[in-house]
């Protein structure tokens, strides 16, 4: 009786270990598949990083050129010749700006025509009802 009980316990243990081995094999297969996917993802990231680093270098060069151009422009604008030219282009005391009178009704008519143009291009899903309320 004691030997048959020991045999039963060992058979149960063998069965449990067999299940654990099967689960571990399944986990190993999943891990290998995940590793392959991760390697593919890493390769894609490496290629994207390489292409973006090239773009970044081009942008840095362009930015440096823009800074140089801005510095040159500031230098030109700060020059005395530019100041003289600027003074020549300003209107003298005899010239002045003329203010054009505009009535409220004219402004309202212009605003309504602008709203009508915008309303024609805006769909209901984009919030056309807001324009309708104003009109």
Image (tube, helix red, strand yellow):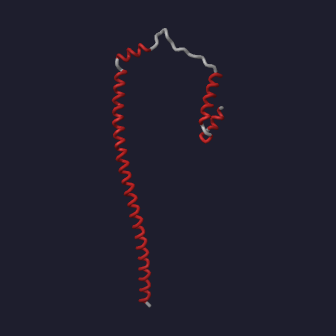
Q: Position of residue 62 (x, y in %)?
A: 35, 35
View extreme (bottom): residue: 1
> Split into 4 quadrants, where in the image is the N terminus?
bottom left
Residue that appears at 51% across and 12% down: 96
> Split into 4 quadrants, where in the image is the C terminus?
top right
View extreme (top): residue: 94
Work out whether 112 lies above or below 28: above
Residue that appears at 61% across and 39% down: 123
Q: Position of residue 47 (x, y in %)?
A: 36, 50
Q: How many marks?
A: 0
Q: Position of residue 65 (x, y in %)?
A: 34, 32
Q: Quadrant of residue 117?
A: top right
Work out whether 119 lies above or below 46: above
| Nearest the eye: 69 or 120 | 120
Q: Position of residue 48 (x, y in %)?
A: 38, 48
Q: Quadrant of residue 22?
A: bottom left
Residue that appears at 35% across and 44% down: 53
Residue that appears at 61% across and 27% down: 111
Left or right position of 107 against 16: right
Left or right position of 46 against 95: left
Left or right position of 111 against 26: right
């Amino acid at each position: 009786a004691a030997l048959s009980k020991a045999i039963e316990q060992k058979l149960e243990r063998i069965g449990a270990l067999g299940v654990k081995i099967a689960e571990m094999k399944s986990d190993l297969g999943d891990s290998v598949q995940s590793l392959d996917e991760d390697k593919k993802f890493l390769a894609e990231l490496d290629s994207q990083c390489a292409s973006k680093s090239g773009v970044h270098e081009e942008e840095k060069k362009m930015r440096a050129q823009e800074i140089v151009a801005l510095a040159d422009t500031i230098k030109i604008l700060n020059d005395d010749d530019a100041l003289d030219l600027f003074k020549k282009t300003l209107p003298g005391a005899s010239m002045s700006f003329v203010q054009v009178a505009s009535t409220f009704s004219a402004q309202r008519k212009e605003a309504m025509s602008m709203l009508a143009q915008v309303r024609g291009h805006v769909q209901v899903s984009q919030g056309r009802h807001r324009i309708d309320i104003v009109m």
